[in-house]
């Protein structure tokens, strides 16, 4: 009990160090969309070949609800809201009731609780095998897609093992031996000899290893290789016209990974939903939800066509303590209220579509999601420490 209470106090202290931001902002409610997407059905539980794991960083119910109201109206549905199975995820880490994205992602990738900041290592800093690494070992193709730097905490936790999330030069280096076929996101500076502390030309190393390097959306569209390192911004994507959006990235990733007869594991992160929450910026949030939901649609379209693909969508934590309040003007706007500039401990939604989707119903611990995905891909024994 004493441990629990001190964990709680640590959580409170850490949350209180963040700025108090009772910012409110009103958003316009969209007209109801003309064609509401249909709720997807449950499908027969056959063996799963592919998994598409979608993480909306910092995406709680209020983020989804405000996205729905502002983008498709009160009667409309975002594509993520058509997924037939829903549950909830408890997100605490091993040392804090409020997780960060590193321990949050490691709970999914390795199926174990670890400390905030940890990338693919347990609380004793021993590396843990990830779902992605197990998939690679079994001959599946793998991909990581993000709108942050590809070396950021969430994608990093699926393919590397470092003690702290800030070690992005090391993370970029470790990606070289990961076997991951498709990396798409930002983070050029962590691969470039001009910016790396060790002046290593990691871009050249990736080229030597067979990767085609992509810098723009045109590069992505015209790419012909089955091994891609797409670095579309120095750090996080800036939504410049030259950058691809999440749909363009996931469609390219799916076109490559689905060539593998044995299947694939693909993780896509809507990274900047979290950043909008940290900044308490509503319009930024809505743009990011829209971008993420379009990638969700592409995933669901692929899975419906394919029949052997499981799509799981969740968040690592909620960001901003966002709530929807009374309408300021009659009927046409909504007030958004933020309670923090950091993450909260509010459980996050879990959604699934495809064979065995019903395994993701109920109130689950974040580690369960990683275990279950591994099990459904035939990868057993989680968690696995690499001694
Ligand atoms: Zn965050």
Image (cartoon, rainbow, N blue to C red):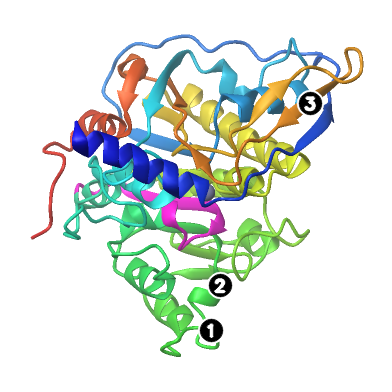
On residue 261, the disc is none
Magenta region, residue range = 138-154
- Earlier-in-chain disc, 1 versus 2: 2
Location of mark 3 (residue)? 335
- Relative height, residue 276 to residue 387 (above, below): above
Q: Residue at x 67, y 17 (%)?
A: 77
Q: Given contact means CB atoms under 8 Å apart, are the residues at marks 2 and 3 in contact?
A: no
Q: Residues within 10 Å of mark 2 (few under 14, many from 20)?
A: many
**Horizontal and vertical percent position of residue 30:** 84, 22
Decide which of 80, 41 is in the foreground and name it: 80
Residue at image coords 52%, 81%: 192
**Does label 2 or label 3 sit earlier along the sequence?**
2
- Residue designated by label 2: 188
Q: Is residue 147 magenta?
A: yes
User: Where residue 176 sits: x, y (%)?
Assistant: 35, 70
Q: CA distance from mark 1 to mark 2?
A: 9 Å
Q: CA distance from mark 2 to mark 3?
A: 38 Å
Residue nearer the viewer, 241 or 343: 343
> What is the x, y in percent for residue 336?
74, 29
Cβ–Cβ under 8 Å for marks 1 and 3: no
Helix, strand or loop under label 3: strand
Residue 50 as seen in the image, left or right of residue 272: left
Q: Are marks 1 and 2 in contact (CB under 8 Å)?
A: yes
Q: Quadrant of residue 172?
A: bottom left
Comes first in the chain, label 1 or label 3 = 1
In what quadrant of the picture does the N terminus appear? Answer: top left
> Is residue 105 shown left or right of residue 131?
right
For the residues labelled 1 and 3, the Cα–Cα distance comes to 42 Å
Which residue is disc 1 drawn over? 195
Element assignment for label 1: loop
């Amino acid at each position: 009990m004493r441990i629990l209470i001190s964990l709680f106090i640590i959580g409170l202290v850490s949350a209180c160090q963040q700025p108090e931001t009772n910012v409110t902002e009103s958003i316009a409610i969209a007209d109801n969309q003309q064609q509401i997407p249909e709720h997807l059905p449950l499908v027969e539980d056959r063996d799963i070949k592919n998994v598409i794991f979608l993480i909306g960083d910092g995406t709680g119910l209020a983020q989804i609800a405000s996205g729905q109201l502002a983008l498709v109206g009160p009667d409309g549905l975002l594509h993520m809201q058509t997924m037939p199975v829903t549950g909830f995820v408890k997100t605490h880490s091993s040392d804090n009731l409020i997780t960060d994205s590193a321990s949050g992602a490691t709970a999914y990738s390795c199926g174990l609780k670890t400390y905030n900041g940890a990338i693919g290592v347990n609380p004793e800093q021993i590396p843990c095998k990830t779902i992605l690494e197990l998939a690679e070992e079994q001959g599946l193709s793998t991909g990581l897609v993000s709108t942050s730097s590809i070396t950021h905490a969430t994608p990093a936790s699926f393919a590397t093992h470092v003690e702290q999330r800030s070690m992005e030069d090391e993370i970029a280096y470790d990606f070289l031996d990961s076997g991951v076929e498709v990396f798409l996101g930002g983070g050029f500076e962590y691969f470039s000899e001009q910016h790396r502390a060790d002046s290593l030309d990691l871009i050249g190393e990736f080229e030597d290893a067979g990767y085609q390097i992509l810098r723009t959306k045109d590069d992505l569209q015209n790419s012909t290789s089955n091994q891609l390192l797409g670095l579309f911004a120095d750090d996080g994507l800036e939504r410049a016209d030259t950058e691809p959006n999440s749909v363009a990235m996931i469609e390219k990733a799916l076109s490559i990974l689905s060539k593998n007869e044995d299947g694939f594991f693909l993780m896509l992160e809507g990274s900047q939903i979290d950043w909008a929450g940290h900044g308490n910026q509503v319009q930024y949030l809505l743009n990011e939800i829209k971008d993420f939901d379009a990638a969700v649609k592409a995933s669901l379209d692929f899975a419906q066509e394919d029949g052997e693909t499981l799509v799981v969508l969740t968040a690592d934590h909620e960001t901003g303590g966002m709530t929807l309040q009374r309408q300021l003007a009659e009927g046409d706007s909504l007030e958004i209220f933020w309670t923090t500039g950091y993450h909260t401990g509010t459980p996050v939604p879990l959604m699934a579509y495809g064979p065995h989707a019903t395994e993701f119903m109920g109130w689950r611990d974040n580690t369960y999601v990683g275990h279950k995905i591994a099990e459904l891909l035939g990868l057993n024994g989680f968690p696995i420490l690499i001694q």
